[in-house]
Amino acid sequence: MAPKSSNSKPSFMPFSLALSIFFFLLITTLVQCANGGQNYPDALHKSILFFEGQRSGRLPPDQRLHWRRDSALHDGSFAGVDLTGGYYDAGDNIKFGFPMAFTTTLLAWSVIDFGRNMGNELGNSLKAVKWGTDYLLKATSKNGIVYVQVGDAFSDHNCWERPEDMDTLRTVYKIDKNHPGSDVAGETAAALAAASIVFRKRDPAYSRLLLNRAIKVFNFADKHRGAYSSSLHSAVCPFYCDVNGYQDELLWAAAWLHKASRRRHYREYIVRNEVILRAGDTINEFGWDNKHAGINVLISKEVLMGKSPDLKSFQINADQFICSVLPGIAHPQLQYSPGGLIFKAGGSNMQHVTSLSFLLLAYSNYLSHAKRSVPCGGVSASPAALKRLVRRQVDYILGDNPLRMSYMVGYGPRYPNRIHHRGSSLPSMAAHPTRIGCKAGTKYYLSPNPNPNLLVGAVVGGPNSTDAFPDSRPFFQESEPTTYINAPLVGMLAYFSAHP
Ligand SMILES: *[C@@H]1O[C@H](CO)[C@@H](O)[C@H](O)[C@H]1NC(C)=O
């Protein structure tokens, strides 16, 4: 099962709550000092290794997670195209293009902003980005078509099978001009454009390929507007149904293309479409469905660098977004658990924790450069205060929480043992070379035993709103890892590795 984010409405902070925010930030600092330090370089290493466990297709000789083997080597054959490779998005064996593209965008953003903090792990991060973009290039190799999913989610979810012997339907889903999907195409263009920045100096030819493709895919997304959840409703809903609309992905793609290409065209597009495409919907949400907060934070960087006064409104939106995430606000869409973790109802919570925290951290760096704080009612949130809040979230994930357990598999002395993940929970190909069929996997799903294969670095959906965690496979909201939980975490762990 794949988690889904909830749709929510904008809201602003009442002034009267400013004081409680101040106290929360103070208490956060005190709690911080009382806790033992986390091993951020170890967590960074593992957070990237996780992506190797999610790989689909033929595994390369330098694959480090050895219990995985080649899988899905005929993906695309139904449509006569090569769609091998890419990532399984979570604990199942589907390749969902929408969250895969978002994952790739956030991995690229992690490298762009925090690559200099990655030390020895930079090379592995680049490989993780490229594993995503190599696939997205295949998915966009035909003009006017984007292949957006391989695998039938209902068929897949009916079985508990290793990817290596999966025999479920590998249906290929695509969008085209008669079946538009500006959301998934926009996100795909954003991922390709962001990755072109990552590879600009490191591999100029590949970078140019990515940028040129991003431009084409964006043109297609913009010209043939529509939501893929209308065009492909029965395939993508309720799994990665775009509840929030496709407007945000068009702006998001244009923002990344503006950053990657420096062409005036994209800047003009952003200014012209700011209101039409609702840039100001700065609700306290950021994830595979909703990019509004990310757009505003991304564009604010250059405003805060003093380069683009005409984009000032994005920075005002970003400020408002920051205030809407701070603790101390009685907010229907975002709470903090008693133990201090950001909590949003519905779906996998940890995706919100990592993606919102990533924006706070990225923005705090932009603010530092501009020597600015965010005015939130009566208080001002300084870059240092935002960083403390982010560190608190990261430390919670790594073990500074009421259960004293890490939510990253393989990190620290206690971590989830029964994650909702087919490959991790079934015997490996080495341990059990013969096939385990669709329903033959059920006994492993229901087993009380720990998973035999450690999906090192996987961060799960996490505890509920009262900091309780069942560590049980059927509780998929709590125990399933996803690629888009980890992608922003990579950047944050890099930052804290360099600034312990
Ligand atoms: C959280 O999980 C615990 C233990 O499973 C349960 O007792 C509690 O009711 C849950 N809380 C909420 C708000 O769901």
Image (spheres, rainbow, N blue to C red):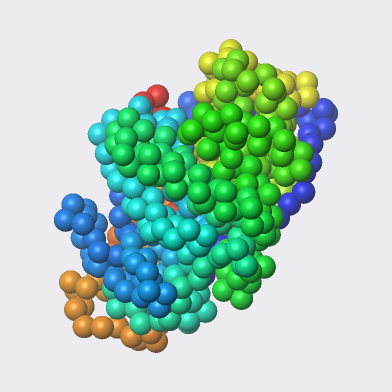
Residue 378 percent across, percent down from the top left: 78, 21
Identity of the residue drawn at 48% across and 34% down: 260
Q: Is residue 106 left or right of residue 117?
A: right
Identity of the residue drawn at 69% across and 46% down: 334
Residue 454 percent across, percent down from the top left: 30, 60
Asked whether 356 or 268 is in front, the reply is 268
Image quarter hosting the C terminus: top left
Identity of the residue drawn at 29% across and 78% down: 165
Residue 276 percent across, percent down from the top left: 76, 43
Asked whether 257 or 476 is in front, the reply is 257
Asked whether 432 or 358 is in front, the reply is 358
Does residue 342 lie above or below 224 as drawn? above
Q: Is residue 192 visible?
A: no
Does residue 466 lie above or below 16 as drawn? below
- In the picture as drawn, the residue positioned furthest to the front comes out as 143
Q: Is residue 410 left or right of residue 273?
A: left
Does residue 370 lie above or below 37 as drawn? above
